[in-house]
Amino acid sequence: MRISEYDAFGPWLYEIDDGHPMPPLFVPYVDQTKPYRMLFKIPRDIERRRATPDMDLYDYVAAADDDGVQIWSRREKTVETTRMSYRDITGIRLYQRLLHGVCTIYGESAQLRLPYNTVSADVMWRFADLVRQSYRGESGIALRGDPDLRETDIDIWLYNQMRDLRERGTDFSIDAYQPCWDDLRTDRRLPWKRKEEFAGTLYLHNGRELLLLRSGKPEKKGEQTYSAEFTSIPWEALKGVSLENSPHHEHTLLARICLPGTALQTEIQPERRGTVAFLEALAAAEH
């Protein structure tokens, strides 16, 4: 049964269908005759009590079709369109902290960013899975994970992320693990040192992708807890890995995972020898 856009409005992401139609502002811009694999709308981040029937209530419409993804973004009373083909996608990241979620699609020359409320996390996961299904290349790298790592060693926050990934049907091998920890930041301009928190990271892989699960890393200061981050990198997009001492922290190594157009960074304690060995082997492999 079709209900009005105003009556249906809330934090939810809706797939566009007979019951949840295209937002009026987007109708002239989106070709609804195309056979999309997925077509959904993302609401404005406002309280339900502040919404009125005459407002444009949706900020984004997103789609995945046979060739790529397309995002339509509200800009006041007009709409901006951005498209990225699957062959240009170099990874996808889902960040969640409590009700705040961000989907980032990495591309060779740009990034697409979609904010969402995590009450609709399943919708965004299905969108991410469609993107990941487009990965073409298989890894020719012979990877050997930390032989001493056991699943029981992994902290509960990361373990639950891994369990959820497994229940969604994703195949993977567990390679290495870095728990959350603090390190001292050094700053030559200041006479003191201060502690900073680093995310825990679980390194996984399968035949098509390198997978990172992270927890505890704030997107901004003050968000140290309750965060979860999933990043998928197709092997065909991985251009190299470097490992070096951090220039800003006393006992931290930085791993830079290089993709066309960007580099992702993870932090490692030097004493985590199994994790360091895995990243060194990944850095030494030909990509």
Image (spheres, grey):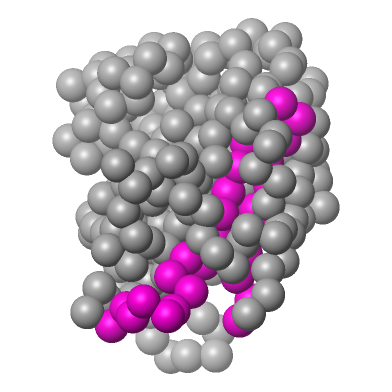
The magenta-colored residue range is 50-76
Is 199 located above or below residue 6 in the figure? above
Q: Quadrant for the C terminus, please.
A: top right
Give the camera-side residue of 185 and 202: 202
Q: Is residue 70 magenta?
A: yes
Q: Position of residue 274 (x, y in %)?
A: 43, 25
In terms of image quadrants, where is residue 11?
bottom left
Is 79 located above or below residue 65 in the figure? below
At a point 43% along the width and 91% down the height, the residue shown is: 191
Give the camera-side residue of 136 and 201: 136
At a point 71% along the width and 26% down the height, the residue shown is: 66
At a point 42% along the width and 63% down the height, the residue shown is: 43
Residue 116 left/right relative to 240: left
Give the camera-side residue of 72 and 117: 72
In terms of image quadrants, where is residue 239?
top right
Q: Position of residue 31 (x, y in %)?
A: 71, 46
Give the camera-side residue of 198 and 111: 111
Total numbered labels: 0
Q: Is residue 61 magenta?
A: yes
Q: Quadrant for the N terminus, please.
A: top left
Is 103 located above or below residue 87 in the figure? below
- Whether residue 240 is visible: no
Residue 6 left/right relative to 57: left
At a point 25% along the width and 73% down the height, the residue shown is: 48
Is 97 located above or below residue 122 in the figure? below
Q: Position of residue 262 (x, y in %)?
A: 72, 51
- Whether residue 126 is visible: yes
